Amino acid sequence: MQILELIGRQKELFKDDIDANQKQLKTIVSASRFLVIGGAGSIGQAVTKEIFKRNPKKLHVVDISENNLVELVRDIRSSFGYIDGDFKTFGLDIGSLEYDAFIKSDGKYDYVLNLSALKHVRSEKDPFTLMRMIDVNIFNTDKTIQQSIDNGVKKYFCVSTDKAANPVNMMGASKRIMEMFLMRKSKQIPISTARFANVAFSDGSLLHGFDQRIKKQQPIVAPNDIKRYFVIPKESGELCLMSCIFGDNRDIFFPKLNESLHLISFADIAVKYVKSLGYEPFLCDTEDEARALAKTLPKEGKWPCLFTKSDTTGEKDFEEFFTDNETLDMNQFINLGIIKNELNVDDNKLELFEKKINELRSNKSWKKDDLTALFFKMIPDFGHKETGRYLDHKM
């Protein structure tokens, strides 16, 4: 069963928009130079492939994971072959001295796309990973924008998240604060971004976990009370490229809600997934029961599944791509909506955030409460609720 069917769809979401703009996309991409940061993650790979297949003059891909970069190259060579332009990958941490030297050595790009992020809600479970999330999602982004400005880049794109709209977790809030920093830099360079749904079967996602559990003959576990919107990896790449190429300064692209894009629960997808592999789901009551039955049930054509209610910090009851006070353009594209932002920057607030974070980092000592309090100052209506329980506490 294909990914589309697993998430309850028959048709690719942005096909009509891509078809309508295909000629212009190809013309622009084939005449341009691209840098993709974080290009070996699930979304980054999808974006890189969308650019590559339109024959760019230059395509450089940076990522911290050398293994994922190897797979990206193998995937591209196996699917598309070669291009006339300059295609290279670099195993670099964008927060490092080596990355800065790499940019200094060349840095000549028309478009820079930043897909680098700590994306997991579970990253707020301890103050140290949370601080790294702030560094990656906010400060590294701000740094790479400044480097783009210094090198005369034409356009900067950065991926956001649906969780930045009325955020309830620290990951979503970090992306919302990142959008504030983008706004400040938009005075010096055109910037566009995208908020979109969960990417089905992306690395580290719960659906990707289903695949891993089957391979390791372990139970499938999922919440039965949480519904989410899903896009497939290819659609995530298309959304990012459309925003990068066609977005005006400060635009945020998002998928329009229609009959094709609908909420579906993780438990429902799990049932479809298990059945697609030829197994009948067997519902368990406890983790111990599920672990024990994983040793015997598959031989009988059944797979142990544990579906529970969610009680962890940072889970949002529903998903939204925009808020009531944001201005929308729903007419430019068929299945893409656009949030149109006027320049609105609170420099004092951003400077306070930078100062406080730098103070905490220089002391090499901070608590999660310090960071949470600072987030509430930045986002007064931040809906964060601490339950004391995180996804790492569950199977």
Image (tube, rainbow, N blue to C red):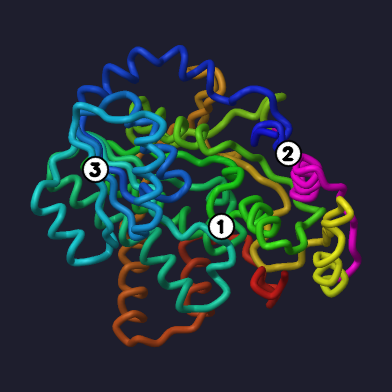
Amino acid beneath label 2 = Leu
* Quadrant (top left/top right/bottom left/bottom right) for the C terminus: bottom right
Rendered position, 39 above or below 296: above
Amino acid beneath label 1 = Gly
Specify the farthest residue to the left.
Answer: 105
State how far apart marks 1 and 3 are (Cα).
24 Å
Q: Is residue 95 left or right of residue 223?
A: left
Q: Is residue 268 magenta?
A: yes
The number of numbered discs placed on residues in the rendered structure image is 3
Q: Is residue 266 left or right of residue 341?
A: right
Earlier sequence position, callout 3 versus callout 2: 3
Earlier sequence position, callout 1 versus callout 3: 3
Rendered position, 290 above or below 275: below
In the rendered image, which residue does mark 2 sit on?
263
Specify the farthest residue to the front.
Answer: 299
Q: Is residue 314 magenta?
A: no
State how far apart marks 2 and 1 are (Cα).
20 Å
Q: Position of residue 298 (x, y in %)?
A: 82, 57
Q: Which mark is residue 285?
A: none
SS label for mark 1: loop
